[in-house]
């Protein structure tokens, strides 16, 4: 392994000043599939996600994501992935539309493309009607969908979702799983965590 869109982790170890969060964690996710990391609070799920998304250093082991080594070539990994973390990355004071346009601009899209992309995502995630309201007025489910939309501005080869359904009611949960299924059907590899 790995292909340009798979995930491979071998014997990852991570200790935070005394606390061992990962003690020989290995994983292989085939390109174009969805894989769930299941575990109770404190099991090390977020630690694994942060390592695989180049946000956190580890003590030993090896990881390759989307065809690049996480330690040796983090820039390539970052170009090919997206992450929706456990807490929302969107700005509550901005509207849903403004948030998505901002993310697009941060990814260097021309203003027009950023606006078009924002509109498409708002439509796709059922947020078109709420598009011009500030995000802090959104329900938990709407916020989660906006957060997911923000990570899809640029189509990732591998998408990481840290607890995408936590705090969602059954309907919003189903919408989230449907969005994940659509992405996988489209060829995206998805690695998600859940309790
Ligand atoms: N920055 C940190 N400093 C010290 N210890 C940490 C840090 N981050 C995580 N830990 C510890 O590492 C272990 C794994 O934490 P992690 O956040 O990876 O778990 P998790 O599976 O994501 O949990 P949750 O389900 O609550 O999100 C826990 O014991 C936690 O207390
Ligand atoms: Mg966590």
Image: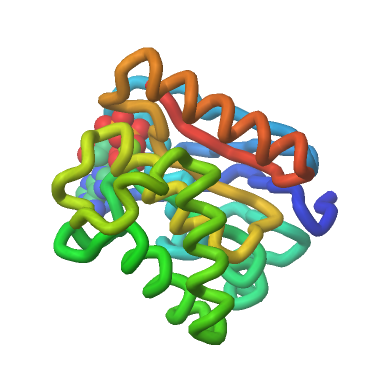
Q: Residue drawn 65% across and 36% down?
A: 27
Residue nearer the viewer, 127 or 30: 127
| Image location of residue 55, percent across then percent down | 42, 63
What quarter of the picture does the C terminus occupy? Answer: top left
Asked if one can make out residue 109 in the rendered structure from this viewpoint, the answer is: yes
144 sits to left or right of 105: left
- Residue drawn at 41 percent across, 48 percent down: 128
Residue 58 pos. (x, y %): 46, 58
Q: Position of residue 167 (x, y in %)?
A: 26, 25
User: Which residue sits at x=46%, y=37%?
Assistant: 23
Horizontal and vertical percent position of residue 30: 78, 38
Residue 144 relative to residue 23: left or right: left
Vertical order, 33 against 175 (above or below) = below
The quarter of the picture where residue 24 lies is: top right
Query: Above or below — where is 166 with respect to 118?
Result: above
Towards the viewer: 40 or 140 = 140
Where 182 sits versus 159, above or below?
above
Specify how the rendered protein is coloured.
rainbow
């Amino acid at each position: 392994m790995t292909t340009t869109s798979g995930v491979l982790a071998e014997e990852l170890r991570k200790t935070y000043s005394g606390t061992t969060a990962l003690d020989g964690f290995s994983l292989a996710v085939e390109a174009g599939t969805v894989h769930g990391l299941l575990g109770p609070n404190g099991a090390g799920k977020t630690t694994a996600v942060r390592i695989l998304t180049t946000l956190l250093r580890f003590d030993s082991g090896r990881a390759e994501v989307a065809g690049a080594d996480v330690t040796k070539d983090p820039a390539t990994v970052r170009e090919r992935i997206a992450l929706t973390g456990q807490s929302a990355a969107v700005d509550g004071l901005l509207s849903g539309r403004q948030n998505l346009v901002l993310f697009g601009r941060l990814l260097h899209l021309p203003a027009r493309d950023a606006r078009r992309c924002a509109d498409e995502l708002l439509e796709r995630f059922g947020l078109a009607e709420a598009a011009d309201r500030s995000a802090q007025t959104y329900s938990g489910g709407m916020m989660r969908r906006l957060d997911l939309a923000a990570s899809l501005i640029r189509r990732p080869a591998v998408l990481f979702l840290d607890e995408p359904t936590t705090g969602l009611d059954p309907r919003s949960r189903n919408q989230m799983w449907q969005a994940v299924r659509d992405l996988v059907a489209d060829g995206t590899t998805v690695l998600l965590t859940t309790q």
